Protein backbone atom coordinates (compact mmCIF):
# COMPACT_ATOMS: atom_id res chain seq x y z
CA UNK A 1 0.00 0.00 0.00
CA UNK A 2 2.79 2.45 0.83
CA UNK A 3 4.57 1.85 -2.46
CA UNK A 4 1.33 2.28 -4.39
CA UNK A 5 0.64 5.51 -2.49
CA UNK A 6 4.13 6.88 -3.29
CA UNK A 7 3.79 6.02 -6.96
CA UNK A 8 0.33 7.61 -7.12
CA UNK A 9 1.60 10.68 -5.31
CA UNK A 10 4.60 11.07 -7.61
CA UNK A 11 2.45 10.67 -10.70
CA UNK A 12 -0.07 13.20 -9.41
CA UNK A 13 2.64 15.74 -8.62
CA UNK A 14 4.31 15.29 -11.99
CA UNK A 15 1.04 15.54 -13.87
CA UNK A 16 -0.07 18.48 -11.78
CA UNK A 17 3.02 20.38 -12.59
CA UNK A 18 2.46 20.11 -16.32
CA UNK A 19 -0.77 22.09 -16.07
CA UNK A 20 -0.21 25.52 -17.48
CA UNK A 21 -1.92 28.58 -18.83
CA UNK A 22 -0.64 30.67 -21.69
CA UNK A 23 0.92 33.26 -19.41
CA UNK A 24 3.81 31.67 -17.55
CA UNK A 25 6.39 33.10 -15.18
CA UNK A 26 9.82 33.44 -16.77
CA UNK A 27 12.29 30.63 -16.16
CA UNK A 28 15.24 31.39 -13.94
CA UNK A 29 18.65 30.98 -15.60
CA UNK A 30 19.62 27.94 -13.48
CA UNK A 31 16.32 26.10 -13.95
CA UNK A 32 15.16 24.06 -16.94
CA UNK A 33 12.58 25.89 -18.99
CA UNK A 34 9.48 24.64 -20.74
CA UNK A 35 7.05 22.01 -19.57
CA UNK A 36 9.57 20.03 -17.47
CA UNK A 37 10.82 23.15 -15.72
CA UNK A 38 7.25 24.07 -14.86
CA UNK A 39 6.58 20.51 -13.72
CA UNK A 40 9.60 20.56 -11.46
CA UNK A 41 8.68 23.89 -9.87
CA UNK A 42 5.03 22.91 -9.36
CA UNK A 43 6.05 19.59 -7.77
CA UNK A 44 8.45 21.41 -5.43
CA UNK A 45 5.74 23.92 -4.46
CA UNK A 46 3.18 21.19 -3.75
CA UNK A 47 5.65 18.92 -1.95
CA UNK A 48 7.01 21.69 0.27
CA UNK A 49 3.57 22.91 1.36
CA UNK A 50 3.53 20.86 4.62
CA UNK A 51 6.90 22.37 5.62
CA UNK A 52 5.47 25.87 5.06
CA UNK A 53 2.31 24.93 6.97
CA UNK A 54 4.21 24.06 10.14
CA UNK A 55 6.59 27.01 9.87
CA UNK A 56 9.72 25.05 8.89
CA UNK A 57 10.00 26.87 5.56
CA UNK A 58 9.09 30.45 4.70
CA UNK A 59 8.78 32.37 1.45
CA UNK A 60 10.40 35.78 1.39
CA UNK A 61 8.51 38.65 -0.17
CA UNK A 62 10.65 40.04 -3.01
CA UNK A 63 11.95 43.59 -2.33
CA UNK A 64 10.14 45.06 -5.34
CA UNK A 65 6.82 43.82 -3.93
CA UNK A 66 7.66 45.22 -0.49
CA UNK A 67 8.28 48.58 -2.19
CA UNK A 68 4.98 48.29 -4.07
CA UNK A 69 3.12 47.40 -0.87
CA UNK A 70 4.52 50.42 0.95
CA UNK A 71 3.49 52.91 -1.78
CA UNK A 72 2.06 51.46 -5.00
CA UNK A 73 1.44 54.86 -6.59
CA UNK A 74 4.79 56.50 -5.95
CA UNK A 75 6.70 58.04 -8.85
CA UNK A 76 9.78 58.80 -6.76
CA UNK A 77 12.88 58.28 -8.92
CA UNK A 78 10.81 57.51 -12.03
CA UNK A 79 11.08 60.71 -14.01
CA UNK A 80 12.10 59.22 -17.36
CA UNK A 81 10.45 56.76 -19.72
CA UNK A 82 13.45 54.46 -19.37
CA UNK A 83 13.10 54.42 -15.55
CA UNK A 84 9.36 53.67 -15.81
CA UNK A 85 9.99 50.83 -18.27
CA UNK A 86 12.75 49.39 -16.07
CA UNK A 87 10.43 49.34 -13.05
CA UNK A 88 7.70 47.60 -15.07
CA UNK A 89 10.26 45.05 -16.33
CA UNK A 90 11.33 44.35 -12.73
CA UNK A 91 7.70 43.83 -11.74
CA UNK A 92 7.18 41.54 -14.76
CA UNK A 93 10.19 39.46 -13.70
CA UNK A 94 8.64 38.96 -10.26
CA UNK A 95 4.93 38.73 -11.11
CA UNK A 96 5.12 37.09 -14.51
CA UNK A 97 3.91 38.57 -17.77
CA UNK A 98 1.18 41.18 -17.77
CA UNK A 99 -2.23 40.81 -19.39
CA UNK A 100 -2.19 41.10 -23.17
CA UNK A 101 -5.35 41.98 -25.08
CA UNK A 102 -6.30 39.27 -27.54
CA UNK A 103 -4.49 36.38 -25.86
CA UNK A 104 -6.50 33.22 -25.50
CA UNK A 105 -6.46 31.30 -22.26
CA UNK A 106 -5.56 27.65 -22.70
CA UNK A 107 -5.65 25.18 -19.86
CA UNK A 108 -4.58 21.58 -19.49
CA UNK A 109 -7.65 20.20 -17.70
CA UNK A 110 -6.06 16.83 -16.95
CA UNK A 111 -3.04 18.56 -15.49
CA UNK A 112 -5.23 20.82 -13.36
CA UNK A 113 -7.15 17.79 -12.03
CA UNK A 114 -3.89 16.03 -11.20
CA UNK A 115 -2.61 19.19 -9.50
CA UNK A 116 -5.76 19.41 -7.38
CA UNK A 117 -5.41 15.73 -6.46
CA UNK A 118 -1.76 16.15 -5.54
CA UNK A 119 -2.56 19.17 -3.38
CA UNK A 120 -5.43 17.34 -1.68
CA UNK A 121 -3.19 14.41 -0.79
CA UNK A 122 -0.33 16.58 0.44
CA UNK A 123 -2.63 18.89 2.39
CA UNK A 124 -4.33 15.94 4.10
CA UNK A 125 -1.02 14.98 5.75
CA UNK A 126 -1.50 17.57 8.52
CA UNK A 127 -4.63 17.14 10.64
CA UNK A 128 -6.44 20.40 11.45
CA UNK A 129 -4.34 22.07 8.76
CA UNK A 130 -6.17 25.42 8.89
CA UNK A 131 -5.67 25.75 12.63
CA UNK A 132 -2.03 24.66 12.39
CA UNK A 133 -1.40 27.26 9.66
CA UNK A 134 -2.86 30.03 11.84
CA UNK A 135 -0.88 28.99 14.93
CA UNK A 136 2.44 28.64 13.09
CA UNK A 137 2.00 31.90 11.21
CA UNK A 138 1.86 30.29 7.76
CA UNK A 139 -1.65 31.61 7.01
CA UNK A 140 -0.84 35.23 7.97
CA UNK A 141 2.38 34.98 5.94
CA UNK A 142 0.38 33.81 2.91
CA UNK A 143 -2.07 36.68 3.37
CA UNK A 144 0.85 39.11 3.55
CA UNK A 145 2.37 37.63 0.38
CA UNK A 146 -0.99 37.89 -1.40
CA UNK A 147 -1.36 41.53 -0.34
CA UNK A 148 2.15 42.28 -1.65
CA UNK A 149 1.35 40.59 -4.98
CA UNK A 150 -1.89 42.59 -5.23
CA UNK A 151 0.07 45.81 -4.58
CA UNK A 152 2.61 44.76 -7.22
CA UNK A 153 -0.15 44.21 -9.77
CA UNK A 154 -1.68 47.59 -8.92
CA UNK A 155 1.73 49.28 -9.21
CA UNK A 156 2.45 47.66 -12.57
CA UNK A 157 -0.90 48.84 -13.95
CA UNK A 158 -0.35 52.33 -12.57
CA UNK A 159 3.16 52.59 -14.03
CA UNK A 160 1.98 51.31 -17.41
CA UNK A 161 -0.71 54.01 -17.39
CA UNK A 162 1.81 56.73 -16.52
CA UNK A 163 4.13 55.36 -19.23
CA UNK A 164 1.31 55.56 -21.78
CA UNK A 165 0.13 59.01 -20.63
CA UNK A 166 3.66 60.42 -20.98
CA UNK A 167 3.82 59.14 -24.57
CA UNK A 168 6.79 56.89 -23.86
CA UNK A 169 7.92 54.55 -26.63
CA UNK A 170 10.23 52.33 -24.54
CA UNK A 171 9.31 48.65 -24.44
CA UNK A 172 8.64 46.49 -21.41
Image: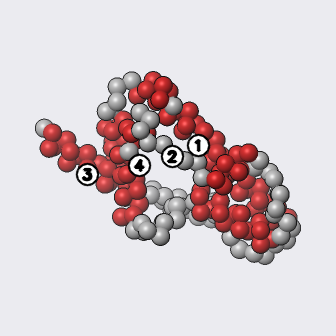
Q: Residues within 10 Å of mark 3 (few under 14, many from 20)?
A: some
Q: Which of marks 3 and 2 is nearer the N terminus?
A: 3
Q: How many labels does the image show?
A: 4
Disc 1 from disc 3: Cα separation: 29 Å
As rendered, which of 2 and 167 lies closer to the eye?
Answer: 2
Q: In this view, does 36 lie above or below 17?
A: below
- Horizontal and vertical percent position of residue 29: 47, 70
> What residue is pinned by disc 3?
11
Contact between labelled residues 1 and 4, with CB atoms less than 8 Å apart: no
Disc 4 from disc 2: Cα separation: 11 Å
> What residue is pinned by disc 4?
45
Disc 4 from disc 1: Cα separation: 15 Å
As rendered, which of 22 and 44 lies closer to the eye?
Answer: 44
Q: Residue furthest front?
A: 56
Contact between labelled residues 2 and 3, with CB atoms less than 8 Å apart: no
Q: Residues within 10 Å of mark 2 (few under 14, many from 20)?
A: few
Q: Is mark 2 on a helix, strand or loop?
A: loop
On screen, residue 78 versus residue 51, left or right, reads right
Q: Residue at x 71, y 50 (%)?
A: 68
> What residue is pinned by disc 1?
145
Q: Is mark 4 on a helix, strand or loop?
A: helix
Which numbered disc, 3 or 2, marks the residue closer to the eye?
Answer: 2
Q: Is mark 3 on a helix, strand or loop?
A: helix
Which numbered disc, 1 or 2, marks the residue closer to the eye?
Answer: 2
- Horizontal and vertical percent position of residue 49: 40, 41
On screen, residue 98 versus residue 8, left or right, reads right
Q: Which of marks 4 and 2 is nearer the N terminus?
A: 4
Disc 1 from disc 2: Cα separation: 8 Å
> What residue is pinned by disc 2?
59
Amino acid sequence: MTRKFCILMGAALLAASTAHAQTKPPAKPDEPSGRWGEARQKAIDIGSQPARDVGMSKREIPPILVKAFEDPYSLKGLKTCRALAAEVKDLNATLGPDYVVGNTYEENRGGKLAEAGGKAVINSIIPFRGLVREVTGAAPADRQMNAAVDAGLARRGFLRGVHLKQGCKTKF
